[in-house]
Image (cartoon, rainbow, N blue to C red):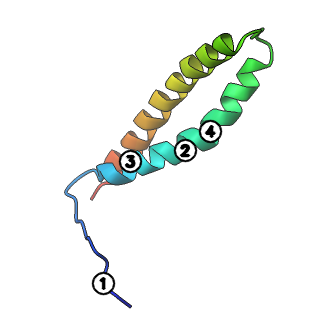
Amino acid sequence: MPEPVERTDPDGVDFGWVMQTTFVATIVVGAPVVAALSIPVSLPTWGARLSFAVRVGALVWILVALSVYAYAKRHAE
């Protein structure tokens, strides 16, 4: 088995892990949340749909990012 190209041993929070986990969790959590929240809202144009998705998606992203960072900070060794 070949050696990995890179190895890291971060002190404290591994920001690479935080970014990757935030990306995946935002897609997994954010898409259903945006879809569910858009059901009762009238979105007649593509611009309205885009604006709604960006506003709700940004809120989901910041909440997920802060949660993942808090988890990583709490479990950092």
Question: Residue 38 appears in which quarter of the rendering?
Answer: top right
Residue beneath disc 1 = 3
CA gap between label 4 and label 2 equals 6 Å
Residue holding disc 3:
18
First-in-chain label (4 vs 1): 1
Residue under label 4, please give it.
29
Residue 45 shown left or right of residue 9 in the figure? right
Residue type for callout 1: Glu
Three-letter code for the amino acid on which mark 3 is drawn: Val
Secondary structure state at the residue bearing disc 4: helix
Crowdedness near tag 2: few (<14), some (14–19) or many (≥20) residues, C-alpha within 10 Å: some
Identify whether 13 is placed above or below 33. Answer: below
Calculate the distance from the C-alpha at mark 4 to the C-alpha at mark 3.
Answer: 16 Å
Residue 56: x, y in percent? 58, 20
Callout count? 4
Tell me if residue 63 comes above or below residue 24 in the rendering: above
Snapshot quadrant of residue 4: bottom left
Question: Disc 4 marks which amino acid?
Answer: Val
Mark 4 and mark 2 in contact? Answer it, CB < 8 Å. yes
